[in-house]
């Protein structure tokens, strides 16, 4: 009994010490540095000092068709609120320790996306309501009938668009994400069912999905076939530089030590390590989308041709940071998104 009480006391004391040290930025940034080396050094600086880079575009490098339709975005109030909230959350030590522990257990048999769905963490941010409205050139009171959000994740990005629609349909691959979406009262369609419901959609959103699914080219054509043929629009976000990979639901082996930040993730492309979304088995997709060039602008130019092939013309375009809530090691994660509005032709 004495031994037990002593043990509990030591444990509580240790926690208190860790917590105390945790609040010092020095330790956190030191820890981050040792874990990630300089890969995420950007996170060391406060976001208001680095964020202007997230929106930059060299318009002269855009093609003649795209240059005049580029929309300059900036760090607005809603984006700051997301970042502030994320910084605050990543400082909650006990919750972060719990998440870290749970994910190392579940990662033995679940994909990273599904674990996030289960724990209700790692929410994403693509655009604010104002940024969405500006892209679609509509006002805050604009209303339309049907939205279809493909690969909706936990539905947090869907929520930004939802006030504008009477009916909201979503698809998801991950079962735990489907639970999250059902909890939020969205109508979940099967991933091989939405093409055949006989509905036409006013807006289809396909956010950060094309590089994560097996048949992106087919997906584009299917979107075209169920989109309302005149007023309908697709809003599409894609992480650049383009690195297609598909997350395999079931993992039979563990090839790294720590599920979250293990050094063994070296063989996976940098961006899902960065998203805290790594782990698991990753496969090459069945269909290849032809994206050329190295720079953001070059890849955007070549994407316009891919969309044209599928029966779309680019109506508007912007550059936005794709933000993900942080974890124990980072306040937040950021990837580089190109966001397009596509009109059917
Ligand atoms: C990177 S997340 C994007 C989530 C959200 N749309 C966003 O922008 O933050 C991609 C999601 O697509 C899902 N997914 C992958 N392949 C899919 C498919 N063929 N149909 C529907 N969802 C799919 C994954 O489970 C994952 O949750
Ligand atoms: C976010 O936090 C920064 C720094 O603490 C503060 O200056 C800013 O006003 C906050 N923004 C919002 C929208 O909460």
Image: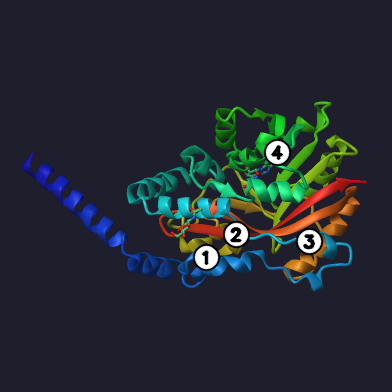
Classed neighbour count for the residue bearing mark 2: other residues with Cα under 10 Å, few (<14), some (14–19), many (≥20): some
**Dot 3 or dot 4, earlier in sequence:** 3
Q: Residue 331, how many percent across, how many down?
A: 45, 58
Relative to residue 137, is residue 208 drawn left or right?
left
Is the N terminus in the top left, top right, bottom left or bottom right quadrant? top left
First of labels 4, 1 by sequence position? 1
Q: Secondary structure at mark 1?
A: helix
Pointers 1 and 3 in contact (C-beta within 8 Å): no
**Would you name the residue on which mark 1 appears?**
48
Where is residue 41? Give x, y as percent.
49, 70
Q: Determine contact: label 4, label 2, CB under 8 Å.
A: no
Frontmost residue, 323 versus 165: 165
Q: Residue at x 39, y 67 (%)?
A: 29
- Sooner in the amino-acid sequence: mark 1 or mark 2: 1
- The circle drawn on residue 149 is 4
Which marked residue is nearer to the observer: mark 4 or mark 2? 2
Image position of 252 (left or right of 339): left
State the residue position of label 3. 70
Residue farthest left in this picture: 2
- Cβ of mark 1 under 8 A from ligand 2: yes
How far is mark 4 from mark 1, CA to CA? 31 Å
Q: Tell which tag, 3 or 4, sits nearer the viewer.
A: 3
Ligand 1 has an atom within 8 Å of the beta carbon of the residue at disc 4: yes
Image-quarter location of ligand 1: top right
């Amino acid at each position: 009994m004495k031994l037990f009480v002593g043990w509990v006391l030591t444990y509580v004391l240790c926690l208190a010490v860790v917590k105390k040290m945790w609040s010092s930025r020095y330790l956190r940034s030191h820890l981050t540095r040792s874990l990630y080396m300089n890969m995420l050094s950007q996170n060391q600086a406060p976001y208001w000092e680095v964020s202007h880079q997230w929106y930059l575009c060299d318009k002269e490098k855009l093609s003649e068709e795209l240059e005049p339709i580029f929309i300059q975005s900036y760090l607005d109030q809603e984006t700051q609120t997301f970042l502030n909230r994320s910084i605050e959350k990543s400082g909650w030590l006990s919750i972060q320790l719990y998440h870290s522990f749970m994910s190392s257990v579940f990662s033995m048999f679940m994909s990273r996306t599904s674990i996030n769905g289960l724990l209700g963490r790692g929410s994403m941010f693509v655009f604010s309501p104002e940024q969405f409205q500006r892209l679609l050139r509509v006002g805050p009171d604009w209303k339309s009938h049907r939205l279809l959000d493909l690969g909706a994740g936990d539905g947090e990005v869907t929520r930004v668009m939802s006030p504008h629609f009477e009916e909201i349909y979503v698809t998801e691959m991950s079962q735990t994400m489907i639970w999250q979406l059902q909890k939020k009262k969205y109508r979940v369609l099967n991933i091989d069912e939405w093409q055949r419901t006989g509905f036409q959609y006013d807006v289809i959103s396909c956010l950060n999905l094309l590089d994560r699914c097996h048949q992106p080219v087919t997906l584009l054509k299917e979107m075209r076939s169920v989109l309302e043929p005149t007023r309908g629009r697709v809003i599409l976000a894609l992480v650049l530089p383009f690195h297609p990979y598909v997350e395999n639901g079931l993992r039979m082996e563990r090839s790294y030590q720590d599920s979250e930040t293990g050094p063994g993730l070296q063989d996976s492309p940098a961006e899902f390590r960065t998203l805290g979304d790594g782990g698991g088995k990753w496969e090459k997709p069945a269909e290849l989308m032809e994206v050329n060039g190295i720079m953001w602008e070059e890849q955007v130019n070549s994407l316009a041709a891919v969309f044209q092939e599928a029966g779309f013309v680019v109506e508007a375009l912007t550059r936005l940071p794709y933000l993900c809530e942080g974890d124990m090691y980072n306040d937040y994660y950021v990837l580089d998104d190109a966001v397009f509005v596509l009109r059917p032709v």
